[in-house]
Amino acid sequence: MLATMGYITPEITGKLPGYLSPSAGLKFADIPNGLGAISKVPAAGWAQIVAYGAFCELSQDQSAGTAAAAGNFGFKVLTSSDPAEKQKKLSAEIANGRLAMMAIIGMFFQDGLTGSAWGDWALYTGSPLRAFESELGVQAPVGFFDPLGLTKDGDTTTFLRRRNTEIKHGRVAMWACIGYIVPEYFRWPGFCSPSAGVSFADVPNGLAALSKVPAFGWCQIIAFCGSLEKNVFVYDPRRGPGDFDTAGALGVPGAKGMDDPEARKKKLNAEIANGRLAMMAVIGMFYQDGLTGSAWGDWALYTDSPLRAYENELGVQAPVGFWDPAGYCVDGSAADFTRRRVTEIKHGRVAMWACMGYIVPEYFKWPGFLSPTAGIKFADVPNGLGALSKVPAYGWVQMIAFAGALDTGFFVYDESREPGDYANGGVLGVPNASGPMEDKDARKTKLNAELANGRLAMMAIIGMFFQDGLTGSAWGDWELYTASPLR
């Protein structure tokens, strides 16, 4: 806080009159504000500063248990005979001190970069980015955009080479976009290759055209591009990147050269913006073409997607739809998908029972004994994780045997039915219910509802375990979390 004030005060109130060091002839007015002052303070001055700081630190007992150790150094403004008031003042000081620590580091940073404690970007003349902030392609609202730091070395030649390359890429991308769009509405008549008997109408639009163009056609394309690169689009360092003097305005052969620098820069900036958009657009076209087999493909055409087999399956519900962020189903194995869905339903059923097992004992417990031989009553068993230590070993054997009997005797998956609908388990696999649901749509609706409830229950039971483990109570609150190192 004192350091921050030391930065601020000289800017507002001015500097002390007279000499900082009469022997050295050094006035207070000669000391710059901020980091620049470090080089001006004489050695004896630093010795005085260090000695004073040591005196403040050592002149008071600050050992554990003292008032000073708690931050109360006896300053009249920051202390009080009322303990609550004193703690309030010290808490406020800590908050202000944290703010000041952030502020002073910010001041050091801007001072070091700009040479001024209150420096602005205009003073940061040493930045390697300054050379490029008014260059072609630096456009609002982003300004000079270099998230990967490719130009942090400040090499102007490399920057201009990259900008020139970007413009060429943009031009190719704009032509590629047009090449995707135009054939949807118009194709040349006649033959693309008379010798091979390939007409323009035979060439599909998009990536599929790559397999139709004959080898000699590729040679022509490459030779034409090379000719433009070597003879027409030749970069002249005296002109802006992309403005090729041999090719007229904006590098278009036969066009009239743009002699007005501002008009030329405006047009080239517009072209760069369009080229950037086209580069994004053509990649999108390649992507959807590769996935769907059509330059304007939609999801209905993406028949090879391994997810298509599951988009109408049980458990695929709005608003998420088929959700597989970890990509477990990208292999398209229907057997693996079904096995996972069966497993999820079982987990959901266990989680729903577990949630009920947490909730019900808060309101009702069975009378009598859980284990007559061990003398353990149901009332003796705590709710939640604490119950694990109370159930006798034979009780665990019974539970595991019962769960195993259900899994191997009742909940046996029949591949002719939806996951979770067990033929020998009644409605939704519940024994002794009114029989299986023969109406397929009604069965799917009920199973989907169960899946949704099971997913919620899986989240809920994990939350119950977490708060129980932290607080020792299934419905624990922060007051019960006495073991927290943050308390």
Image: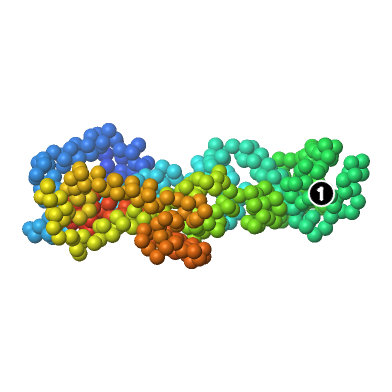
- Is 146 rendered above or below residue 443? above
Look at the image and tell me whether residue 3 can be seen.
no
The residue lying at 12 percent from left, 59 percent from top is 84
- Relative placement, left or right, of 176 versus 319 is right
Name, please, the residue furthest toward the top.
Answer: 43
Q: Which residue is mark 1?
A: 203
The residue lying at 71 percent from left, 44 percent from top is 168
Q: Secondary structure at mark 1?
A: loop
Nearer to the camera, 213 or 351: 351
* Kind of residue at badge 1: Val
Provide residue 307's location: percent of width, then percent of height. 57, 51
- Is 175 rendered above or below residue 214? below
Nearer to the camera, 273 or 256: 273
- Is 367 rendered above or below residue 25? below
Provide residue 323's location: percent of width, then percent of height. 50, 54
Provide residue 295's location: percent of width, then percent of height. 71, 53
Nearer to the camera, 324 or 232: 324
